[in-house]
């Protein structure tokens, strides 16, 4: 008797508008051309399934299946290496090459070398185009830096001038500009570990060069494994190179796995903040998308816990960031996709965890701070004490008080399921997913896409890519698929525009 019929009518109208919107987006998806192919279509297309998008939250009694892995864990050789390195000379020291030295990963790595020169020295620095900051970094670490790279070849002259102005003789350095800059720094003589703080597939070639040169990799470039995993894992095995994760979730898993014997891991548990829309139901978010699309756009670029770049903040809102981390966890730790769980944890204190065969759960906790995982990636297996005035306050459970957890809403976050589907297919499908997401994310931020278009565009690209899927790709195949997927999303946007017109 207390129901307002006007409210019911309004709700019905909004729901109808929502359904019309979804139908139009589906129609746009159907218009995307599937003929743009990096290789001729094969008979494999009919057998590729991108509908398996779930994961097992409740364990069965089936035996755990493991796959090849990038991280030095869960095998006899890795355990021995960890113990031997941990018990080595107390005066251990790491020489570091930093790719992307002027970005956030690079500048934080240099903070470590600045604070603990007894543990870290810098032998190579590479930047994209910021020659002024790069020159200042070279000047500061001139005592140890021998190789300098700048990817934007047009900045070579200004870089030399900036070095001279800073009192550094360019003739005393190996300076490389252009496409080979990253690889030159990645293979610098004397470097023990290479920090790959380069964005996009541009990080693949330098990473391969570093692996082939026998350098350990502090992994901060997600494309290395998400897109390049099928090509990178055999190289790591061939050259005996260690790859340690620099992001918070995978570092937490890596830390939790220290000392865990082969075959003892049962499940990986990835935690997620839930992003900007974690407090909305799927129905509420859908309503906002239809009736307040610009509110959604503004909200999606604001993270409740972390101060991050716009792209990763939107990925957090769609939870594609977690889907990509699922794929990366598979390649890093050899876990089957059914054994990788996603849990929403709004406080971002438990950075991730593992479950072992005896039902124990081992987690890594701490205040949200990206520096700790980065530090561990370059110091592993050692633990380095940093000056307290340069670090977050020490973690205190009493100050924290409480934590909460819940499962993700798969209706609200379809990108998670798309990532599981791409991961299960493997090959070039994960690179297609990643590139399509990057382009859809960018177009959403620029206003060319609405929020609901992001998963639709990604799904359309994956569906089209079934025709030219490559199970065992080369690095060039991976780069070609990356470029193709971006074009496919642009075609989706153009087709969608025609439908709505």
Image (cartoon, helix red, strand yellow):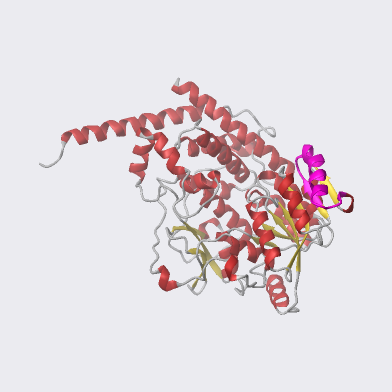
Residue 204 image point, x, y percent? 72, 48
Vertical placement of residue 41 versus 285, above or below: above
Left or right: 397 as drawn, with respect to 470: left
Q: Quadrant of the N terminus?
A: top left
Regarding residue 126, the answer to whether it shows in the image is no
Q: Nearer the viewer, residue 469 or 211?
A: 211
Q: Residue at x 56, y 46 (%)?
A: 422
Q: Residue furthest left?
A: 1
Q: Residue at x 86, y 49 (%)?
A: 170
Residue 498 image point, x, y percent? 49, 21
Vertical placement of residue 365 versus 281, above or below: below
Question: Does the magenta segment cover residue 168?
Answer: yes
Q: Quadrant of the C terminus?
A: top left
Residue 453 image point, x, y percent? 47, 35
Residue 444 image point, x, y percent? 50, 35
Magenta span: chief secondary structure: helix
Left or right: 385 as drawn, with respect to 177: left
Question: Does the magenta segment cover residue 275?
Answer: no
Write down the region rendered in magenta. 148-170
Vertical placement of residue 370 versus 159, above or below: below
Q: Residue furthest right?
A: 171
Q: Quadrant of residue 260?
A: bottom right
């Amino acid at each position: 008797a207390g129901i307002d019929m006007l409210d019911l009518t309004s709700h019905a109208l909004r729901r109808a508008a929502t359904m019309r919107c979804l139908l139009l987006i589906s129609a746009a998806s159907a218009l995307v051309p599937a003929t743009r192919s990096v290789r001729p279509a094969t008979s494999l297309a009919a057998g590729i399934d991108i509908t398996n998008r779930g994961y097992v939250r409740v364990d069965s009694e089936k035996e755990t299946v493991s796959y090849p892995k990038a991280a030095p864990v869960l095998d006899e050789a890795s355990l021995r290496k960890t113990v031997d390195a941990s018990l080595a000379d107390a005066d251990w020291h790491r020489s570091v090459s930093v790719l992307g030295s002027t970005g956030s990963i690079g500048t934080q790595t240099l903070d470590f070398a600045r604070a603990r020169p007894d543990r870290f020295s810098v032998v190579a620095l590479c930047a994209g185009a910021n020659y002024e900051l790069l020159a200042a970094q070279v000047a500061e670490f001139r005592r140890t830096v021998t190789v300098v790279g700048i990817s934007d070849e047009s900045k070579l002259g200004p870089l030399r001038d900036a070095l001279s102005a800073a009192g550094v003789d360019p003739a005393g350095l190996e300076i490389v500009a252009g496409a080979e800059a990253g690889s030159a720094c990645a293979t610098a003589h004397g470097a023990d570990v290479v920090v790959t703080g380069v964005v996009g597939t541009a990080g693949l070639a330098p990473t391969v060069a570093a692996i082939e040169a026998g350098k350990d990799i502090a992994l901060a470039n997600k494309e290395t494994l998400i897109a390049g995993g099928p090509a990178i894992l055999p190289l790591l095995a061939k050259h005996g190179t260690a790859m340690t994760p620099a992001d918070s979730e995978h570092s937490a898993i890596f830390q939790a796995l220290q000392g865990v014997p082969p075959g003892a891991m049962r499940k990986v548990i990835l935690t997620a903040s839930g992003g900007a829309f974690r407090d909305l139901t799927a129905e509420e978010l859908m309503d906002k998308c239809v009736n307040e699309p610009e509110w959604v756009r503004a909200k999606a670029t604001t993270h409740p816990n972390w101060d991050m770049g716009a792209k990763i903040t939107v990925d957090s809102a769609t939870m594609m960031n977690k889907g990509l981390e699922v794929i990366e966890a598979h390649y890093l730790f050899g876990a089957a996709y059914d054994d990788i769980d996603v849990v929403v944890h709004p406080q971002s204190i438990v950075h991730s965890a593992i479950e072992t065969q005896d039902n124990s759960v081992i987690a890594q906790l701490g205040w949200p701070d990206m520096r700790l995982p980065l530090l561990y990636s370059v110091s592993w297996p050692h633990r380095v004490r940093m000056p307290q005035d340069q670090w977050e306050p020490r973690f205190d459970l009493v100050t924290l008080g409480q934590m909460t957890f819940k499962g993700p809403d798969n209706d609200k976050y379809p990108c998670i399921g798309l990532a599981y589907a791409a991961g299960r297919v493997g090959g070039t499908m994960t690179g297609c997913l990643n590139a399509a997401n990057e382009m859809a994310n960018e177009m959403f931020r620029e206003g060319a896409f609405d929020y609901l278009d992001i998963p639709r565009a990604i799904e359309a690209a994956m569906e089209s890519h079934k025709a030219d899927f490559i199970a065992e790709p080369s690095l060039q195949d991976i780069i070609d698929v990356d470029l193709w997927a971006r074009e496919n999303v642009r075609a989706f946007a153009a087709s969608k525009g025609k439908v709505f017109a």
